[in-house]
Amino acid sequence: MGTGTVTYSEACSDALVKLTDAGVPEAKENALLLLEYICGSRRQDMYLNPGRILTEDECAACRELISKRCERIPLQQLVGSQSFMGLEFIVDCNVLIPRQDTEILVERVLEDGAAGKNVLDLCTGSGCILISTAVLGKTGTAVGCDISHEALEVAKKNSAKNAADVSFYEGDLFEALPAGLKGSFDIITANPPYIRTEDIAGLMPEVRDHEPVGALDGGADGLIFYRRIADEACGWLKEGGRIYMEIGYDQAEDVSGIFAAKGYKDIETVKDLAGLDRVVTVRR
């Protein structure tokens, strides 16, 4: 791609060829989104002003970002953000990219009612679950924890970006929390690592190579964190409090069984838009 003579349409076509050759999924959409990000343009500009000449800086940015996307670095990491529940979240290589499937969990919490309730989000990562629940649900005390210091730095930026009144603690699940918070939560949410260790190698390169493996690896059967949550959550939940957890599509029966064995009640499975099991919710 040269400079000074490249049109918007030509830049998009060039990007599409490169991304397609690299095997990038949804190559056309990726090409358009990257051009829009680089040029500060809108989707209709491709059709209304396809002959617009890119500046030298825009051409250089195109070469750099298209090359990185061809290396299968996720689009969201390249543009630095991802929309979730209508809010915008900063993302980088230290956090899982917020996904539409996870919105099912937040939507169920909001449907059940979160106003004024105290919420704990385990494995908070970018903070997308906690922050969107706090902002949209008008919660009471809202607390997130994560074992990753780097992830919490991103979460703190996201809380400021979205003007969310939330607090974060660093540590391994409940071990991160002050003892004074025991028995104070109405709601616990979690999107814990749930990929089976042996399955990680077969994930898309965007996920396998560029998202934090610690946020993916759920052990040999993918259920390590659910067992720990089932063992420890009662000490932090109020009587009648609920837990909402994202799960793998084939884990509903196992996760439900883990919590039933510990005496949890009103166990339900919520499906995602594709009709796959996505969330298990239980009551203390």
Image (cartoon, rainbow, N blue to C red):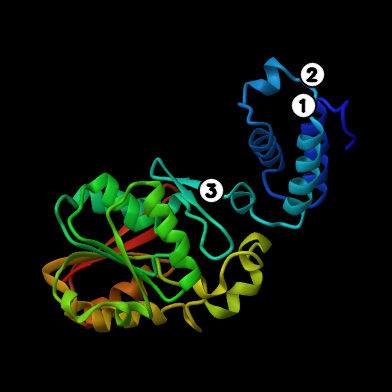
Q: Nearer the viewer, residue 218 or 134?
A: 134
Q: Residues within 10 Å of mark 2 (few under 14, many from 20)?
A: some
Q: Quadrant of residue 56?
A: top right
Place of residue 264 in the rendered image (x, y in percent of width and height, measured from the top left): 18, 75
| Residue linked to disc 3 | 81
Q: Residues within 10 Å of mark 3 (few under 14, many from 20)?
A: some
Classify residue 20 as left or right of residue 185: right
Place of residue 201 in the rendered image (x, y in percent of width and height, measured from the top left): 65, 73
Q: For the point 79% across and 50% down, which residue is it?
A: 67
Answer yes or no: is residue 23 visible: no
SS class of the residue under badge 3? strand
Q: Residues within 10 Å of mark 1 (few under 14, many from 20)?
A: many
The kind of residue tagged 2 is Gly
Q: Are marks 2 and 1 in contact (CB under 8 Å)?
A: yes
SS class of the residue under badge 2? loop
| Residue linked to disc 2 | 51
The kind of residue tagged 3 is Ser
| Residue linked to disc 1 | 8
